Image: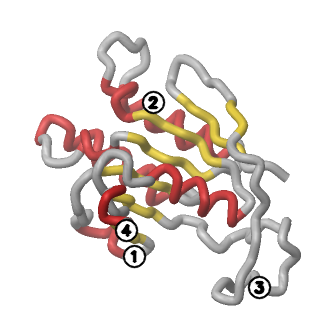
Amino acid sequence: ERSEESPWNPETLRSAQGDNCHAHSDNRHSGRDMPPEAPREGCAQGLICYLYGPPGSGRRTVAGAVCRELGAPMLLADVPGLLDHSSEVSPETGIELAFREAGLREASIFWNGFNLLLGDPASRRLLDKALAEAAGFGGLTFLSGEAPWEPDGTLQAGFLSLETAAPDAML
């Protein structure tokens, strides 16, 4: 079974196969008695994981490894693409469509460039829309940023924030 990463934007949908890796289990996971290739259904439903760190620190790699462990495909969504004013689809509609597509594929979703929605008052409605869709999404949502961030209000339950180290810090 292959883990699949699918780049996505509102105007084109391209499928690309990820690494040919199998899910595996270890004693720290509730699925330890499952065969290595068995997906762990339901263990990450509705979780929002904010991965932050400098460019090149492996945020997408971490998300991909989690998806491979769960035996789930990962849909790649690009915030800069949503903010592109040449698109015929509004950013709000693009957010809805990305989550809908991830749901149809029974995939996790990785929002590249999510940090572009943080701290900018003009992007607040898009941030609220993305968080509302993520909160109602039945799968695992990864948000990618470069600095620590905690959502305000109701998302504290089911929200996890993880820092990825800079490549030099890992030596």
State which quadrant residue 157 falls in: bottom left
Residue that badge 3 annotates = 32
Mark sitting earlier along the chain (3/1): 3
**Residue positioned 69% across, 30% down in the render:** 15
**Residue positioned 57% across, 32% down in the render:** 7
Label 4 to label 3, Cα distance in Å?
A: 24 Å
Mark sitting earlier along the chain (2/3): 3
- Residue 165: mark in rendering: none
Residue that badge 1 annotates = 157
The reply to whether callout 4 and callout 1 are in contact (CB within 8 Å) is no
Q: Secondary structure at mark 3?
A: loop
160 horizontally vs 96: left or right = left
Residue that badge 2 annotates = 94
Give neighbour class at mark 3: few <14, some 14-19, many 20+ (Cα, 10 Å): few
Q: Secondary structure at mark 1?
A: loop
**Residue positioned 32% across, 45% down in the render:** 55
Mark sitting earlier along the chain (4/2): 2
Q: Residue furthest right?
A: 35
Q: Secondary structure at mark 4?
A: strand
16 horizontally vs 49: left or right = right
Question: Is 164 rendered above or below residue 14?
Answer: below
Give neighbour class at mark 2: few <14, some 14-19, many 20+ (Cα, 10 Å): many
Label 2 to label 1, Cα distance in Å?
A: 25 Å
Label 2 to label 3, Cα distance in Å?
A: 38 Å
* Kind of residue indicated by mark 3: Arg
The reply to whether callout 2 and callout 3 are in contact (CB within 8 Å) is no
* Kind of residue indicated by mark 4: Leu
Residue 98 in percent (x, y) is at 53, 37
Residue that badge 4 annotates = 162
Q: Residue furthest front?
A: 171
Residue 127 in percent (x, y) is at 28, 46
Q: Residue furthest bottom?
A: 27
